[in-house]
Amino acid sequence: MRGLTMPFSNGFLWGGAVAAHQLEGGWDCGGKGPSIMDVTTAGDVNTRRRFTGEVLPGENYPNHEAIDFYHRFREDIALMAEMGFKCFRTSIAWSRIFPEGDELVPNEEGLKFYDELFDECLAHDIEPVVTLSHFEMPLGLVNKYGGWRNRKLIDLFTRFATVCFERYRDKVTYWMTFNEINNQADYNNDFALLVDSGIVAEPGENREKAMYQAAHYELVASAKAVMIGHAINPNFQIGCMIAMCPVYPATCKPEDILMAHKAMEHRYYYADVHALGTYPPNIIALWDRKGYDIDVTAEDLMLLQEGTVDYIGFSYYMSFATQWREENAHFEFDETADLVKNPFVKASDWGWQIDPVGLRYALNWFTDRYGLPLFIVENGFGAYDKKEADGSVHDPYRVDYLRAHIEQMKLAVEEDGVDLMGYTPWGCIDLVSAGTGEMEKRYGFIYVDKDNQGNGTLERSRKDSFAWYQKVIATNGEDL
Ligand code: BGP
């Protein structure tokens, strides 16, 4: 039994998280093929990025070089080790392994890169935590197959997953299948649909239906991957990855309460399928009401039941609030139309509402619903940092954010009995923002000298938060 003064177990996975396309660079090195992110431009604080489908001259593609982790990972892993990381969450770039996505034979040079990376982690006693698909499917799969609209993707993904599981069976124990699979619940958003499903919506296409179909194929592919992974190594822990933004009702008006409930169903049914192995009745009812004939076979349903996940990985940055609109007869949640500002919380420069208590709420919500171990695989504060003349970066706002969230995490474990496996703050080293493509939306403990235009030496340095997080890990979360 854990004592009350020690909320986190000895094996608690303190670490940090990144994703291949946001830090590796080397976009055409080592036989890698282009991914969807390699043909997506930078945006800015107000805009999402734009998919151009090919590399156009004169455009800024921030992922091409990113922070050049591909060539500098040894130096970076040494810094993570200095902070005391127990684990490091990254992803495998699918198009390093299968450059076009549908080859029969994987690219050995790509596989070798991850061998070296994982070996480097293990040499420092850092456990790699690996996401198979993090926003960057091979572009070839979008061009040839229409992305996850196509059932063939299930086999292509499981081929990729099998190769990774077999190759790294003795190096990696913790896996996740699809990063933030539920972002596509916001299907009117081009970027969300692209990065989750590789869908570039055609004019007049029913985006909602396309999303449900694509997500179904992904959920089946994930279930198959879980089964394959467990057969390859029964010790594998294979989780899903959910973007958790709890949706609160703006008031206690009954319709607002119901609206928030419906919004939660809409955003998180993906987790139900991953964890419980079945579709909740509200989704089936919605498909019926709208006449959506989704391709779901009896075999699919069996696979979903057999391939449920071992744990719930999730990101938590912010909470949402919603209010019912009278014209919304079916209580359908639309992230553009139905979000309202929460007057009780502050927001970051990018408008992300800062709500540490929401993390405790999320931990409780997942636990009550699924009873599975939880892993907070992203959390963090994107902010503008200023490098002083002497090279230091003072980022007390980042420490404040993380401290407040860890405090809530502690309460969830101590007072609510949540089974928490680990905590990996996002962007532990500055990297390219997924949403905007900016470098200057920084999350790191490690500063990287590069700006939004791509200028800078790429030199790494320690921010104030570096020493703070080092202390947090050394004291197993006691000294915040
Ligand atoms: C999550 C993604 C990450 C990431 C993070 C921060 O949605 O899984 O890839 O980047 O959010 O978002 P952003 O980079 O847009 O600030």
Image: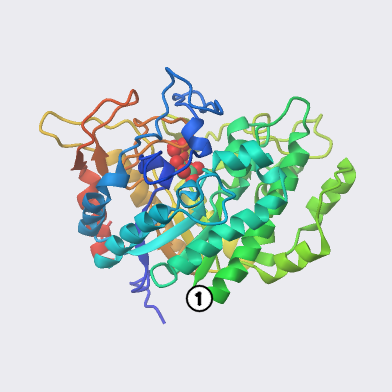
Label 1 sits on what residue type?
Asn
On screen, residue 33 versus residue 121, left or right, reads: right
Above-or-below relation of 26 to 389? below
Above-or-below relation of 190 to 13? above
Residue at disc 1, secondary structure: loop
In terms of image quadrants, where is residue 111?
Answer: bottom left
Q: Position of residue 119 (x, y in %)?
A: 30, 64
Which residue is disc 1 drawn over?
233
Residue positioned 53% across, 26% down in the render: 50
Q: Position of residue 318 (x, y in %)?
A: 50, 43
Between residue 115 and residue 225, name the one nearer to us.
115
In the rendered image, the residue lying farthest to the bottom is 1
Q: Position of residue 4 (x, y in %)?
A: 37, 74
Q: Is mark 1 within 8 Å of ligand 1?
A: no
**Mark 1 packing: few (<14 Cα in 10 Å), some, or many (20+)?**
some
Q: How is the image coloured?
A: rainbow
In terms of image quadrants, where is residue 380?
Answer: top left
Q: Position of residue 416 (x, y in %)?
A: 51, 67
Residue positioned 42% across, 17% down in the render: 58
Between residue 268 and residue 475, name the one nearer to us.
268
Q: Does residue 422 appear in the picture of this structure?
A: yes
Above-or-below relation of 111 to 141? below
Locate the C terminus by quadrant.
Answer: bottom left
Residue positioned 35% across, 34% down in the render: 383
Locate the N terminus by quadrant.
Answer: bottom left
